[in-house]
Amino acid sequence: MSAEQTPGSPEHERPRARLTTVFPRAGRRTFLLSVSAVGVPITGAAVLAWPVAVAAWESLAPPTAQVLRAVGVIVCLIAASAGLARLRGERDGPVWLGRLILGAWAVAVGVVAALVVGAWWVLGTPAWDPPASLTPKALDSIATRAFAIVAGLGGVALLVINYRRQRTTEAEDARAELAVVREDTRLFTERFTTASAQLGDPEPAVKLAGVHALAHLADDAPQGRDELVQMVVDVLCAYLRMPYAPAPGPLPADADPDQVREHRAAGLEFAALREVRYTIVRVIGDHLRADTRWRGRNYDFTGVRFDGGGFHGARFTGGQVSFVRAVFAGRVSFDGAEFAGDRVSFAGAEFVGDEVTFTSAGFAGNRVSFNGAAFSGALVSFDDLRFTGNRMSFDGAVFAGDRTSFDGAVFAGDQVSFNGTGFRGAVVSFTGTEFVGTWVSFGSAAFDGGRAAFEGAVFTGDWVSFGGVRFAGEGVSFERAGFGGDRVSFTDADFTSEGVSFAGAAFTGAQVAFTDGVRAAKGPCPRGLGEALTRGGPGGVALPDGWRTDTAGWDTTT
């Protein structure tokens, strides 16, 4: 080895560099396999082609063995082409165009050969009978077919080129689209960081700017990235959940000037932060009233204190909505709102404002809960409410306001529950309410406030229960009510109020029970019960022994 070709010298490394250029990704094993894939078929083709070449030179009518050798040559050449394509295809980047063309040619030749062999087989494998000499016409025919073959191979190559160009264009478009998405996401992140910082600024004016910036950011989120909209909603809801200093109390009569200034500053700070909170509620409500991407998101208002604003006409069309332990201290309106999420919860919420209204609200979610909620405002209205979901419950809730109304409401869901609910207000009204669910229960509820009215109410569920209910208020009216369920139960109910009336009511269901033989309704027989039983004609009635005289004319059974 000369000094110029010592290991590490440029002259020594140049051949290796050439090999690396030709085979940049091929390892030693891949290289040997690829060389074998080229060399072996070429050697086989040469061995098989030599007798064919000799026979073709000697005679234009080769024997069958020579035909087989010719076919073998074609197969070996195709295999050699595939091996060569393998070597050239080891480089980085897209698949080599020549490899695709060779592959397409190989497929085309294979298909034509298969068709020729198939036709030859269908015709009964006739022997080859070539002409003794080639006429000019035959030569012209051969030339025409040769040109057709060349044109066909060219057409195949053109198809491959067009296909490759289309794939390249699509790949470039996909990369460009991905780049745009990444750029949009980057810009969104930058804007989100800036807007969130504004919302956390100590200055109320900057906070307000942050609220509106976040709202616009959610509106501008890239299509298909609804999780970015949810992220903005989560930030706004989290701000509402954050604790804040309450409004300052009244000043003492002997307050000094410093106390007056501090009280005024505290009042201004509270009013400014309250305006930020009002703005967030208004922004969320406005977006839920319009057909925007804010619908269908999760909203977590757990423990939030609402001292103003409202969600009238808002549409919570999906996700989960939580007002758990929220406090509604001002006038709050959910009139015309729609709740269609999987779970909607007002559990433990406190409604202490002057007026809380759910008039014409719609609940179609899987589960709706007002369990443990406390209604102490002057007016609580669920008039014309529509429930069509799976389960709606007011278990353990307390209605202590001046008036609680469910007039005209329709409970058409699978289950409606007022178990353990306390009705302590001056007026509780279910006038014209329809309970058409399969399961309706007022079990152990207490009507011990003023007057409760179920006048004209309709109960058509499979099972309707007032078991263990205490009617101890000024009066309870089921006048003109209709009980059409398969089973209606007032077992263990307490009719201590003398103003309980079923006048004009009708029991048209299968079974009506005021006792089960062990637990019997207490108190005097409600007025008009006998006539109501007679009018409806249920399939079976169970009454306490003491009520039989009061229901004379009805043949009771136990």
Image: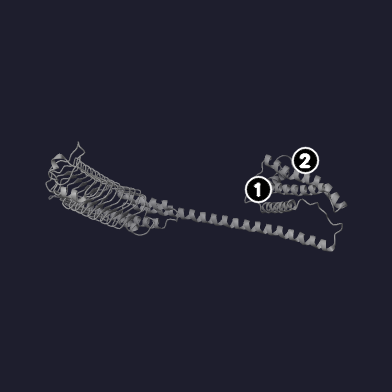
Task: State the SS at label 2.
Answer: loop
**What amino acid is found at the position of numbered circle 1 in the picture?**
Arg
Q: Earlier in the sequence, mark 1 or mark 2?
A: 2
For the residue carrying disc 1, how many other residues have a C-alpha within 10 Å: few (<14), some (14-19), or many (20+)?
some
**What amino acid is found at the position of numbered circle 2 in the picture?**
Ser
x, y percent for residue 183: 48, 55
User: Could you say which is closer to the camera, residue 523 or residue 486?
Assistant: 486
Question: What's the CA distance linking mark 1 and mark 2?
Answer: 33 Å
The reply to whether dot 1 and dot 2 touch (C-beta < 8 Å) is no
Residue to which mark 2 is pinned: 2
Q: Residue furthest right?
A: 58
Q: Which mark is residue 91?
A: 1
Dividing the picture into quadrants, the one containing residue 212 is bottom left
Left or right: where 413 falls relative to 124: left
Task: State the SS at label 1.
Answer: loop
Q: Which mark is residue 160?
A: none
x, y percent for residue 263: 20, 51
User: Could you say which is closer to the camera, residue 65 or residue 378?
Assistant: 65
Dividing the picture into quadrants, the one containing residue 147 is bottom right
